[in-house]
Amino acid sequence: MRVQHITVDCASPYELARFWSMVTGWPISAIDEPGDDEVLIEPPEPGMAELLFVRVPEAKAGKNRLHLDLVPTERTRDEEVVRLTAEGATVVADRRTPEGRGWVVMADPEGNEFCVETER
């Protein structure tokens, strides 16, 4: 088995896909446009799981049971936290330690949690 999509239920698929496209650097599918009920962002390599954003009528309720842990590739963890906050993410919990390890729990514009880990 291979994971095809990681699907995110949301109120505004295109807008949320734009945020995650900015986070990952992955493009929105050329066939998707504002107002669509499903919007895909495509990974850079074939065979990687795609991120799919699907409109649902109900609002998010409670903590995510599944989330993404992201590791910066071009910036430090702290630089990414600043960049993502400027783009609409919020800090949920700061788990950074004085010696520089740890992570930051953030939420996207619709409240879906994700973590920004220490760069490798």
Image: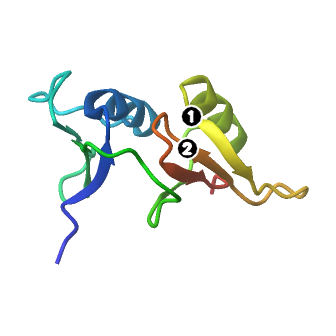
Q: Which residue is mark 2?
A: 107
Q: Residue at x 39, y 34 (%)?
A: 25
The image shows residue 51, relative to residue 97, as above or below, that is above
Q: Is residue 68 left or right of residue 14?
A: right
Name the residue carrying label 1. 89
Give percent across and percent down for residue 114.
Answer: 53, 52
With respect to residue 11, does 51 lie above or below? below
Q: Secondary structure at mark 2?
A: strand
Q: Is residue 8 left or right of residue 4?
A: right
Q: Tell me what residue is drawn at x 17 percent, y 33 percent.
A: 29
Viewer-closest of 11 and 112: 11
Closer to us: 3 or 58: 58
Location of residue 1 (image quadrant): bottom left
**Looking at the picture, which amino acid does disc 1 mark?**
Ala
Instruction: For the residues labelled 1 and 2, say whether their Cβ atoms are less than 8 Å apart.
Output: yes
Ranked by sequence position, the earlier of labels 1 and 2 is 1
Amino acid at circle 2: Ala
